[in-house]
C-alpha cells in the first residue's frame, strides 16, 4: 500500500544538529524519514530502502537526484533528457528513467534530500523571500523480508510519497514579471486542475480530469485510488494573507471528503522478486551494449519502438 502526504505550501527543510538530531523546527519530510528508520530498526528485520526525488516545473519533470552534467559540457534546458510519464499497466503511472538511490540510514536520506532540494527552482517575490516555483515528489520505497510458518520467505513492499506543493500565487501581489509570471501561471494551472479533480471525486462525477495536468497524473492513485492520503495545509496567520489562507483551507476541506479504497501492502515470493531484478539487469545490460555499439538511439531498437508505441497510445488518449 502506498501512502501519500500532500503539503500545501512551503515544507521546511532544516539543518540537523551536530549529532544528526532533528531541530524543533524540522519539516514534515525529515520527521517522516526519521520515524520510518526508527520503526525499521526497532523491528530487527532485514529491509531495503530506495528513494526517488523529482520536480515538476512548468509541466516538465526533472530528476533532482540525477548526476550533475560535467561543467565543460554546457547543456541547454531544451536539450536536457526529458523524463516521460508512462502508464505502468496496473492503473498507475511511472516516470521512465528516474534515478533510484538505495539508502541505509536516515542520515543518508537527509543528505539526498538536501542535495535534491538545493536543485529546486526558488525565487524571491514580494510575498516570500524563498518561494517554490515548482512542485516536488519525494518517494520512499521499502522492502521487508518476512518468513511464513512454513519457512517460505516473503517480501513485503510499501511506499510513501511525500509531495511538496508550491502555493498558489496572486501575480499582481507577488510582483512576478516575465519568466516568473509563467511559473506562477503554471503553478496556478496545475493546482486548479487538482481542485477540479478533487471536486469531481467528491461530487462523484463520471469524468475525472486526471490527464489535464502531470501533477494530477502523478497523484492519480492517491486521489480516489488504492492508497491512504493525508493533506497538510500550511497557512499564515497574518491579515494580508487571508485570501490565500481561506483558499488553502477550502482546498483541504474538499480533499477530506474524498474516499479512497486502500489495499494492504503487497507481498511477493522472494524468488519472484529476484526474477524481476534479473530481468531489470538484463534490460540495463542491453541498453549499455546499445550505447557502446551506437546500435539504436542509445537503447536497444526494440525498446525504442516499444516506448514510441506507448507514447502514441497516450497521445491518442
Image (cartoon, rainbow, N blue to C red):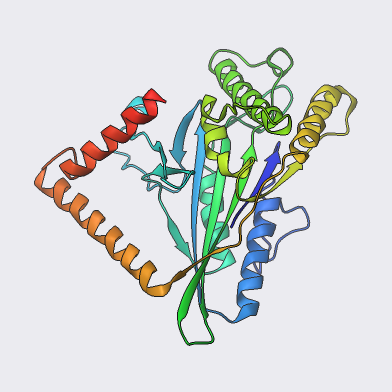
Residue 237: x and y in percent read: 88, 34
Q: Which corner quadrant of the image does residue 128 belong to?
A: top right
**Tag count:** 0
- The front one of 294 and 199 is 199
| Direction from residue 22 to residue 98 in the image, left or right | left
User: What's the residue at 74%, 25% (across, down)?
Assistant: 127
User: What's the residue at 56%, 79% (across, down)?
Assistant: 45
- The front one of 302 and 73 is 302
User: What's the residue at 37%, 48% (across, down)?
Assistant: 67
Residue 153 lies, with reference to residue 98, above or below; the image says below
- The front one of 305 and 106 is 305
On the question of residue 52 being in view, the answer is yes
| Direction from residue 305 to residue 48 in the image, left or right | right
Residue 68: x and y in percent read: 37, 45
Residue 172: x and y in percent read: 71, 12
**Residue ranking furthest to the front:** 206
On the question of residue 124 being in view, the answer is no
| Direction from residue 245 to residue 293 in the image, left or right | left
Amino acid at each position: 500500500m502506498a501512502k501519500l502526504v500532500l503539503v500545501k505550501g512551503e515544507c521546511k527543510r532544516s539543518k540537523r544538529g551536530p549529532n544528526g538530531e532533528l531541530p524543533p523546527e524540522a519539516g514534515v519530510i525529515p520527521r517522516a524519514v526519521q520515524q520510518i528508520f526508527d520503526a525499521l530498526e526497532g523491528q530487527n528485520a532485514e529491509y531495503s530502502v530506495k528513494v526517488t526525488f523529482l520536480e515538476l516545473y512548468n509541466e516538465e519533470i526533472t530528476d533532482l537526484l540525477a548526476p550533475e552534467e560535467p561543467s565543460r559540457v554546457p547543456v541547454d534546458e531544451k536539450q536536457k533528457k526529458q523524463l516521460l510519464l508512462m502508464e505502468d499497466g496496473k492503473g498507475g503511472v511511472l516516470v521512465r528513467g528516474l534515478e533510484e538511490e538505495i539508502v541505509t540510514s536516515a542520515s543518508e536520506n537527509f543528505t539526498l534530500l538536501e542535495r535534491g532540494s538545493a536543485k529546486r527552482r526558488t525565487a524571491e517575490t514580494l510575498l516570500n523571500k524563498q518561494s517554490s516555483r515548482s512542485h516536488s515528489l519525494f518517494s520512499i520505497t521499502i522492502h521487508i523480508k518476512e518468513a511464513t510458518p512454513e519457512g517460505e520467505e516473503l517480501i513485503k513492499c510499501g511506499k510513501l510519497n511525500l509531495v511538496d506543493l508550491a502555493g498558489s500565487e496572486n501575480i499582481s501581489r507577488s510582483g512576478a514579471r516575465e519568466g516568473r509570471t509563467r511559473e506562477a501561471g503554471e503553478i496556478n494551472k496545475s493546482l486548479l486542475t487538482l481542485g477540479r479533480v478533487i471536486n469531481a471525486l467528491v461530487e462523484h462525477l463520471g469524468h475525472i480530469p486526471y490527464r489535464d495536468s502531470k501533477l494530477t497524473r502523478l497523484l492519480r492513485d492517491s486521489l480516489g485510488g488504492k492508497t491512504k492520503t493525508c493533506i497538510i495545509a500550511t497557512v499564515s496567520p497574518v491579515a494580508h494573507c487571508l485570501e490565500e489562507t481561506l483558499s488553502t483551507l477550502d482546498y483541504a476541506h474538499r480533499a477530506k471528503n474524498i474516499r479512497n479504497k486502500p489495499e494492504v501492502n503487497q507481498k511477493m515470493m522472494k524468488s519472484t522478486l529476484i526474477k524481476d531484478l534479473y530481468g531489470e539487469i538484463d534490460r540495463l545490460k542491453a541498453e549499455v551494449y546499445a550505447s557502446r555499439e551506437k546500435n539504436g538511439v542509445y537503447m536497444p531498437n526494440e525498446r525504442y519502438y516499444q516506448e514510441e508505441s506507448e507514447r502514441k497510445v497516450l497521445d491518442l488518449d
